[in-house]
Amino acid sequence: MKYVFCLTGLLSLLALSLFSFKKETAVRPNILFILADDWSYPYASIYGDKTIKTPNLDKLAQHGTVFTNAYCASPSCTPSRAAMLTGRYPHNLGEGVNLCGRLDYSIPTYVQLLEKEGYSVAFDRKGWAPGDYMKMGYTQNPAGDSAKLGFGPFLDKLPKGKPFFFWFGTNDPHRPFDLGNGKKAGIDPSKIHLPKFLPDVPEVRGDVADYLSEVERLDREIGDLLKKLETSGQLENTIIVVASDNGMPFPHAKANLYDYGTRVPLLISRFSKPLNQPKRNDSFVNLIDLMPTFLDWGGIKQRPVVDGISLLPVLNGQKTVHRSEVFLERERHCLCRAELDSGAGYPMRAIRTKEYLYIRNFRPNRMPAGDETIPNTPSIFGDVDGGPTKIYMMDHRNDPAIKPLFVMGFEKRPAEELYVLKDDPYNLHNKVKDAALAQTKNALRKRLDKWMQDENDPRQKGGGDQIDKYESTTHAWITRDGIIFWDK
């Protein structure tokens, strides 16, 4: 027995020493995070869309995992990006919950933690934005040091053996679009699978074609980034993550908790060692889950409290299901309501399951798309991005075929909404008053209430008025055809 014990102990020590050696000598992976701007699921060939060509995304998918149920925490640029950076739900970020809000420097981000542990961290183009980070304690963008010369020069200057995290924040496919660029790019507007919340007219089809041409441009830029990685010899040890901050800039989409506002593409790829997971995963992901995943890849031991859950067990094949549901939220997007000196937002919370989408509108007396006009400002329905589709719907709002779509996209909503997704993928038919679904509605309401209570959400029990009083670091006014930023 003594001999067996000694042998067992020796083997244990040997295994421990081998594990320690492996851990000490392991090369930490680089991480390239490609974040699109206003890109909705399912607009890519990896999701079955045959209208556009995205060959570089197809290439990445061959070496990784495509997630089909990924959601942003908030369908608005600044809070969505802040939530990704911190791994926290937006309502846990104080003033960071609003567009152009303030992200408190004391809240840890993965950028800070990775840089502290030896990563070279930088970003190009759009990082944490829009907003003025200089007004909140940051000396550089929360996404990292600006790589003013781009990704290639960043790689050229990288010290040998030093791991990097690089945030490539493209502005595509954010408005404004180049009018007619979709047709020029070879996209046939007549073949587009148009979402049913948009009018099926040439003006709108052309607008969506222009949007899709920017998705194709995003794909080409992904190809350029891959070439730079390959040329530098860094491709084999780089994990590539592709996602979007929120959904498409159209009515009933961006700045809403409907699927086309919150459901986004997510692809995670690695060329040297394909992740041990089927190439598609249908379980739910909230993009706040990226933060703890990045920390796992970086080997960060000291962790802050986060709401996100690491994707590593799913990517490594230890689990097949990540989340069974997601919770979504929205506060103030643009300054577009006259109340509270234009500070009034449109607070919402939602639970999205495989079968249902349940939404709570906490201030249904307000206009979800913003007031049509606000005196002494250029705002016009300021929570709907300006462009041809918005103009068409405003100008034809009284046409019998357009009026129901205009009402859904621009006018007031009830306090609760319930959508049955198998019958209604575009979230058009609110079933909240359907007696046959009363039990389902009550169960979803309780789950959402419990989540808000567990999360200490300021909006629970009708509260949260302080959120509307938070000042913006800059002013964003959306017009019929564009956006105007103004700093006091």
Image (spheres, grey):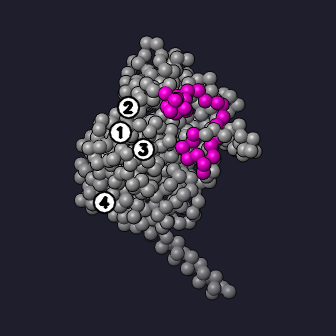
* Chain-order first, disc 4 or disc 3: 3
**What residue range appears in magenta?**
399-428
* Identity, as a three-letter code, of the amino acid under mark 4: Gln
Taking the image as shown, residue 217 lies to the left or right of residue 396, namely left
| x and y, in percent, of residue 70 in the image | 51, 50
The type of residue carrying mark 1 is Gly
Label 4: element kind: loop
Please state if 228 lies on the left or on the right of 376 as rendered.
left
Q: Residue 160 lies in what quarter of the image?
A: bottom left
In the image, taking residue 484 as reference, residue 293 lies left or right, namely right
The residues bearing labels 2 and 1 have C-alpha atoms spaced at a distance of 9 Å
- Label whose residue precedes the other's in the sequence (3 or 2): 3
Secondary-structure class at tag 1: helix
Residue position for label 2: 388
Note whether residue 275 is visible: yes
Count of residue discs? 4
Q: Which residue is mark 1?
A: 206
The residue to which callout 4 is attached is 234
Give the Cα distance between marks 4 and 3.
Answer: 27 Å
Residue lying at 42% horizontally and 53% vertically, measured from the top left: 49
Residue corresponding to mark 3: 39
Residue 319 sits in quarter? bottom right
Q: Secondary structure at mark 3?
A: loop
- Quadrant of image for the C terminus: top left
The residue positioned 45% from the left and 50% from the top of the image is 42
